[in-house]
Image: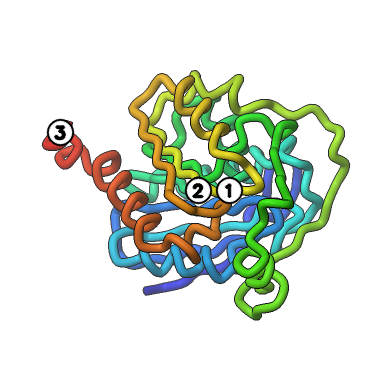
């Protein structure tokens, strides 16, 4: 495997840090992290390692996160970051898939509603409306999510963000999802305490393209599915991309 690292520049002059893992594949998976995360988060790096035998993998930091510049704009401007990534990838691969987590999934839906830029999308713990995130702190797994995040080296690595103003107008994914014309798989933890499963369910209902909804029993929020429900989570990801990024397989299973 060859690992390239560098920076992309968005249309509004923000620096976006990336990591491009090449393993001689003709298909690539892009991983878009969620709020308070980055490409260097251990669980997302582990996901990359589980995919690299079958796909090249591209990871990046949204503005205000990780090694990227700027401030997080609460999904108002992050679509420009994803645009820069997709322009970099364009023409390099036969097929492109995107795994987007939490608010990163909201960014992906809003941006891809403008037109096809990838061949397949997986939204993990997607928020249908950023103004209606549940964030039920009392349902937090204190021994799992909180202890892992705050008191272990793995949980702390790659975490944090630099906030910008939050009152800018935001697009709502639920208003845009019916214009996303690529296959979409929604994966959500049953016990997600930040973004409740109803978000993915309503997005699924409004999706007009090829679609799938997976609720992982006892699963937590976003990247924590790689910690608590790893095998099922990775299996669902690989299964979805197998049938949506390899047309011959899709034809056999259709």
Residue extending furthest toward the bottom: 153
Residue at mark 2 to residue at mark 1: CA–CA distance: 5 Å
Give how far across and how far down residue 100 sits, in percent: 52, 46
Residue 189 tag number: 2
Residue at mark 1 to residue at mark 3: CA–CA distance: 34 Å
- Label 3 crowd (10 A; few <14 / some 14-19 / many >=20): few
List the residue tagged with mark 1. Answer: 192
Which quarter of the picture shows residue 251?
top left
74 versus 232 height, above or below: above
> In this rendering, which labeled residue sits more in front, label 1 or label 3?
1
Which quarter of the picture shows residue 248?
top left
1 or 3: tag closer to the N-terminus = 1
Q: Is residue 242 left or right of residue 146?
A: left
Color theme of the render: rainbow
List the residue tagged with mark 3. Answer: 251
Q: Quadrant of the N terminus?
A: bottom left
Label 1 near label 2: C-beta < 8 Å?
Answer: yes
């Amino acid at each position: 495997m060859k690992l390239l690292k560098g920076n992309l520049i968005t249309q509004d002059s923000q620096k976006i840090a990336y990591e491009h893992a090449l393993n001689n594949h003709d298909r690539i998976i892009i991983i878009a992290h969620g709020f308070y995360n980055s490409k260097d988060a251990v669980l997302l790096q582990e996901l990359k390692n589980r995919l690299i035998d079958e796909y090249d993998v591209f990871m990046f930091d949204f503005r205000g996160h990780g090694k990227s510049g700027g401030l997080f704009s609460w999904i108002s401007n992050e679509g420009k970051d994803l645009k820069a990534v997709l322009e970099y990838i364009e023409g390099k691969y036969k097929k492109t898939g995107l795994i987007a987590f939490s608010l990163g999934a909201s960014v992906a839906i809003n941006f891809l509603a403008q037109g096809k830029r990838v061949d397949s999308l997986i939204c993990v713990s997607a928020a249908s409306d950023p103004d209606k995130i549940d964030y039920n702190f009392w349902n937090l797994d204190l021994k799992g999510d909180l202890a892992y995040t705050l008191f272990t080296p793995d949980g702390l690595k790659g975490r944090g963000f630099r906030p910008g103003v939050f009152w800018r107008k935001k697009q709502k994914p639920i208003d845009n999802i019916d214009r996303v014309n690529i296959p979409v798989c929604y994966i959500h933890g049953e016990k997600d305490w930040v973004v409740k499963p109803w978000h993915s369910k309503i997005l699924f209902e409004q999706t007009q393209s090829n679609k799938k909804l997976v609720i992982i029993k006892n699963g937590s929020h976003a990247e924590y599915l790689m910690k608590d429900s790893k095998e099922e989570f990775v299996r669902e990801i690989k299964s979805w991309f197998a049938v949506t990024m390899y047309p011959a397989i899709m034809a056999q299973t259709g």
